[in-house]
């Protein structure tokens, strides 16, 4: 296959399998020789923060001199982002200056997918009705690539849920890490916190320690937090595995600014700094540090956390005007965004650029961000993300007018611009005019497009 044909083959596979089991991906894996066997894997599930945790893990392990396979989803700008290998500190330095560093190359994608497609096609030839999904194919490609590259460790981020996720074909990971719980993908995971956490807890394996984000710090209701903790505790008790909760009561914030934040872990007195700006990032960093405590030194952990970068998570795209790009795309993400902006606005007004997927609760998301009294909202430009599932700019504008309280509605300027590139130009002009901080949020699809457009504008 040439590269375009390869990507077409992948995209034409079903998005989701109709089979509510891992049977199809296990069969595909078996026909490929179970390429995940022999890999030392850290497995991550959860609603919010998986990517940040995976970046902390990768940066720490690479700082310690290891070759790390890194599997994430979704991608922001390029398919190749999903699979990369970071070669120790040298590869880490390259990645931190060029986000394309370490990505799987097109030739490897084509070559490996040819092998994976033969195995998938043989399943169909043998009369197996439930065929591998798009994510099954990509996950197998990642395992093969990491095996070829002789990775010391693999940081493996689940795609959706956990129990039925393609990545859950693995056995005996070094640690299972559960990021912050929340309500997302409810069409696949269920409408209750018990159902959602049951799916996330599905990655837990016998003999594997679990490190979990404390639900009481996850910006969900107290009732949901109780349910989330109980569900995870019951699963760990059932499998007789240790469960370690990580939350805000385990660290003290020392400083917070647009340059980053520093915090002290209370039980060890270790002081860490991170460039990531989200107020929840110390918990994500400590989840990674705790999971790696027996693999690397304390100094490697400090250096890795300090070096960590992760695009589109309160990423600074410009200093004049000051532009923040955040991937907040659900209710919990918007609560966290508001808390961060309250500390980052430095008494300047805010202009927002927003696009949200149609299947998200954008009514509640807009209410959370625009009605906050922790900063002055001066303007918002609604646009459409470059994806067929996007809500229209006009639809979101109409919704915003419905959810805004009268005081906020009187002070905020609102408009809709369907083309995201033109919408960015409008938002930048408004930020300049009002001396405002520009915050772009609502969709990772929008985030990827905006990152590319901002680079073009800055040339």
Image (cartoon, helix red, strand yellow):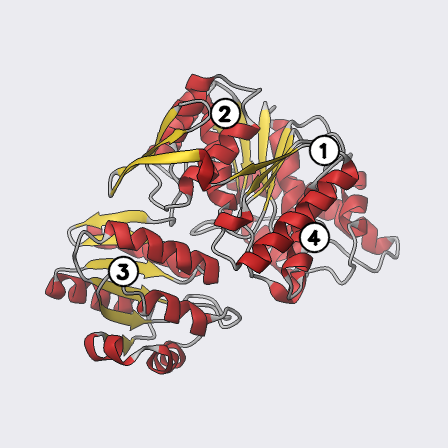
Q: Is residue 119 left or right of residue 216?
A: right
Task: For the residues labelled 4 and 1, say whether their Cβ atoms are less than 8 Å apart.
Answer: no
Mark 2 and mark 3: Cα distance apart in space: 38 Å
Callout in the foreground (4, 3): 3
Label drawn at residue 374: 3
> Label 4 belongs to which residue?
198
Q: Earlier in the sequence, mark 2 or mark 3?
A: 2
Residue highlighted by disc 1 = 241
Please name the residue shown 58% across and 49% down the image.
46
| Residue at the spot 18% in from the left edge and 51% down from the top edge | 346
Q: Marks 4 and 2, how far apart in space?
A: 29 Å
Q: Earlier in the sequence, mark 4 or mark 2?
A: 2
Task: Tell me which numbered mark, 4 or 1, is placed earlier along the sequence.
Answer: 4
Q: Residue 275 appears in which quarter of the rendering?
A: top left
* Dots 1, 3 in contact, CB < 8 A: no
Residue under the image location 55 percent in, 32 percent down:
69
Q: Position of residue 289 (x, y in %)?
A: 49, 29
Observer-side mark, 4 or 2, equals 4
Residue 436 lies left or right of residue 134; in this view the side is: left
Circle 2/circle 3 CB separation < 8 Å: no
Q: Tag 2 or tag 1, which sits nearer the N-term?
A: 2
| Label 2 CA crowd tier, 10 Å (few <14, some 14–19, many 20+) | many
Looking at the rendered structure, which numbered label has been put on residue 61? 2
Q: Of the two numbered discs 4 and 3 on the same chain, state the one appearing first in sequence.
A: 4
């Amino acid at each position: 296959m040439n590269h375009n044909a390869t990507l077409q083959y992948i995209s034409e596979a079903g998005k989701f399998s109709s089979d509510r089991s891992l049977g199809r991906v296990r069969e595909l894996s078996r026909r490929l020789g179970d390429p995940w066997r022999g890999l030392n894997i850290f497995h991550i599930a959860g609603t919010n923060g998986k990517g940040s945790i995976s970046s902390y893990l990768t940066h720490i392990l690479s700082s310690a001199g290891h070759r790390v396979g890194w599997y994430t989803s979704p991608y922001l700008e390029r398919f190749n982002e999903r699979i990369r290998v970071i070669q120790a500190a040298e590869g880490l330095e390259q990645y931190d200056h060029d986000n394309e560093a370490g990505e799987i190359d097109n030739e490897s994608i084509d070559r490996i997918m040819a092998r994976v497609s033969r195995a998938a096609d043989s399943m169909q030839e043998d009369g197996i009705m439930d065929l591998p999904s798009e994510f099954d194919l990509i996950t197998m490609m990642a395992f093969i690539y990491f095996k070829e590259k002789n990775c010391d460790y693999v940081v493996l981020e689940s795609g959706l849920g956990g129990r039925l996720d393609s990545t859950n074909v693995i056995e005996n990971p070094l640690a299972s890490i559960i990021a912050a719980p929340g309500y997302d993908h409810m069409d696949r995971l269920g409408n209750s916190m018990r159902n959602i956490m049951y799916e996330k807890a599905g990655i837990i394996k016998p003999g594997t320690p679990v490190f979990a984000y404390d639900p009481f710090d996850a910006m969900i209701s107290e009732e949901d937090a109780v349910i989330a903790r109980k569900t995870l505790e019951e699963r760990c008790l059932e499998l007789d595995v240790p469960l370690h909760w990580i939350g805000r009561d385990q660290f003290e914030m020392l400083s917070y600014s647009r340059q980053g934040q520093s915090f002290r872990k209370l039980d060890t007195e270790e002081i860490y700094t991170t460039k990531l700006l989200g107020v929840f990032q110390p918990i994500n960093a400590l989840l990674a540090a705790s999971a790696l405590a027996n693999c690397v030194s304390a100094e490697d952990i400090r250096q890795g956390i300090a070096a960590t970068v992760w695009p589109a998570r309160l990423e600074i795209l410009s200093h004049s005007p000051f532009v923040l790009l955040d991937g907040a795309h659900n209710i919990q993400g918007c609560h966290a965004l508001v808390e961060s902006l309250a500390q980052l606005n430095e008494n300047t007004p805010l202009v927002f650029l927003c696009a949200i997927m149609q299947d998200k609760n954008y009514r509640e998301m807009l209410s959370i961000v625009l009605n906050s009294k922790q900063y002055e909202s001066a303007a918002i430009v609604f646009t459409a993300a470059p994806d067929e599932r996007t809500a229209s700019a006009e639809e979101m504008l109409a919704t915003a007018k419905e959810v805004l309280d009268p005081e906020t509605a009187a002070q905020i300027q609102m408009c809709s611009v369907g083309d995201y590139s033109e919408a960015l130009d409008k938002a930048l002009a408004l930020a300049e005019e009002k001396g405002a901080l520009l915050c772009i949020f609502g969709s990772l699809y929008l985030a990827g497009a905006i990152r590319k457009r901002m680079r073009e504008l800055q040339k």
